[in-house]
Amino acid sequence: MVQPRSPGVEDGSGGGYRWVADGGRRAATGGLRGRLDALRELIALSRTRLDGRTLEGAGRVLETADERYRLSGEHTVVAIAGATGSGKSSLFNALAGANRSQVGPRRPTTAEPVACVWPGSRPGAEGLLHRLDVPAHRRHTPADGSSELHGLILIDLPDHDSSATEHRAQVDRMLELVDAVIWVVDPEKYADAVLHERYLRPLAGYAEVMFVVLNQVDRLPGDAADQVVDDLRRLLDEDGLALGEHGEPGAAVLALSAATGRGVGELREALGQFVAERGAADRRLAADVDAAAERLRSVYVAQSQVGLTERARAEFDDRLAEAVGAVATGRAAERDWLRYAERACGSPWTRMRGRRGNRWGTGGSGAGATGVGAFTGAGGPTGTGLTDEGRAGGPRARMGRMGAGRGDRRAAAVGQTCGGRNEATRDEVGRTGAGMTGAGRAGPGRSGGGRIAPWRNGMRRSVVGRQGLPGHLPSAGAVAGGGGEPTVDGRAAARPVVEQAVRTVAGEASHGLPAPWAQAVREAADRGAYGLPEALDRVAADAEESLRGGPAVKPRWWTVAASLQGLLSVLQVVGLLWLLGAVTGVGEGTAWVSGLLPALVGSVGGPTLAWLCRVVARGPARRYGQDAERRLRSAAAGCGRARVLEPVAAELLRYREVREQYAVASGA
């Protein structure tokens, strides 16, 4: 279909359109007005998502509609179009009742459009004629002034197959502006491919404002006219043009002879009824909106149901939890809790040996490094679990300690990192031992242990005792001796996980969407993913920092167990002193029997109580670790929602809005 031009908007001054002061202009009917408003809203919502060329046709439809409704609503503009020699000018004169358009053997005969105006109840035809660029000397009135055609503006167009290029361009332009068209064909050229392929087939959606007239039937013998009409109907049906038969809306097909007047009365009667309805402009514009909506269908109608499912959201959260090492952090927190419980409930001798080992740098690694401690069964009652003080000399001591209310502070930090979209620099998130994304918690190394931290997100951390190797923490002794601290950047392992999570959720969200909207969803996800690994690094570091001091509220049974351990230690000391006195002869020779009982009770009771505490501590430690994992998982998910899921959801919501507007505009 030939695209319409972009009409200029002119006012009543300076030779513009004539504004009808007495109310000759009218608004669109309710249904069409709603569709036009929806199309206007559709364009407004889509300007930042679709290129201007895609929306250009719909914009021209709105301009054409506004322009048409500013002019007279009492007049109906009907054009007569046809090929060279089809007799359209003869039909124009027959309807006008006089020779208003030149007829002759010279081709092309009609070089300019000719108008015949039947006056209506109100003025306003001049504005329409000015819009069509009909020269003033080509504007006429009918000879008889019959009232049945009041309000009709009949236009005789140049030949659509004229040898003059400007004539064909003029026909194409005016066909986009008139309210209805009478196509005139003759028995020789009614099946012309140019007519059907260039005009009738593309204009099939305009059947309700179209007449197809077989002229020159006086040249056909017998019933040949009926046969030609039947064949014409067949061709129109193949073109997809609905035919107005049996009261159904569609194009009217008539046979007549402008030369003899046969059938002209029927056409005049049909035109009179058509003009009297005053609905041609609405039907023409409705067809324009239909055509514009069909052209936009591919960029608004999804191939399948769209949206982000709960399963996709859950998988995205799981991948982010994997990136920050939520499971490993929970297990590390569980081991930390067990170590703190061991320190609180162990015997004084166990605590003294632990402090001595820490002082000489031979203590166990942090909970996230090896998880070694008395309560994990790796060292017995004299386990090597580090306390917070024991880790003070390591490279992670610079991070500071968190007191009570760590969870609230961590939540506030997460809100600033993710909600405020603050970007963490490499220096901020790449500090040694700062709990990078995908990295385990690594404490000071053993002096000769060479232990390897557990895998987290495909990256093994903290090979102790290998100072200077990339990706490993130095031992405490090496740090004390002035060795450098190589940075451990967990993002090397976490970034691919985060990027894959973003790509997956963007793919799920954009599946089935039209190409421009799928691209908008992916771009929204990409913008949100920028800086997401660094934000998750900070979340992981904040979560680790909040766990450094152990549980904020110590269980009461720790105090009870510590008191019992103190009492048993006193019994052990008293019993041993009693036995020592008996052996050295300070006391009576049989006094050792009295000292044996408290010594045995103290020596056996302490380890037994420590074992019982280990058994009792497993449940609370597990819950503590699960709570730490849940908090970190929730914080990572919050980052993902704020940076990726919410922008993606906003794009999907915008698409749903435009899809609803498209449904209204298309009349669905």
Image (cartoon, rainbow, N blue to C red):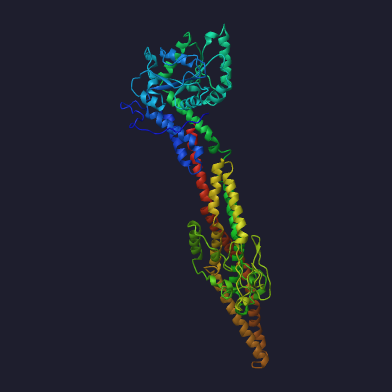
Q: Does 495 sit above or below residue 449?
A: above
Quadrant of res 318: bottom right
Q: Does 617 sit above or below residue 418?
A: below
Q: Can residue 592 be seen at all in this image of the molecule?
A: yes
x, y percent for residue 430: 57, 65
Viewer-side residue, 416 vs 412: 416
Q: Can residue 616 be seen at all in this image of the molecule?
A: no
Total label count?
0
Which residue sits at x=64%, y=93%?
Answer: 586
Viewer-side residue, 344 vs 551: 551
Q: Does 300 sit above or below residue 359?
A: above
Q: Residue furthest top?
A: 222
Quadrant of res 279: top left
Viewer-side residue, 272 vs 464: 272
Q: Residue furthest left?
A: 22
Q: Which residue lies furthest to the front in this view?
A: 106
Which residue sits at x=57%, y=7%?
Answer: 223
x, y percent for residue 652: 52, 44
Q: Does 491 sit above or below residue 383?
A: above
Which residue sits at x=37%, y=17%?
Answer: 141
x, y percent for residue 293: 51, 33
x, y percent for residue 533: 57, 58
Instruction: Describe residue 18's horizontal placement relative to residue 65 as left or right.
Output: left
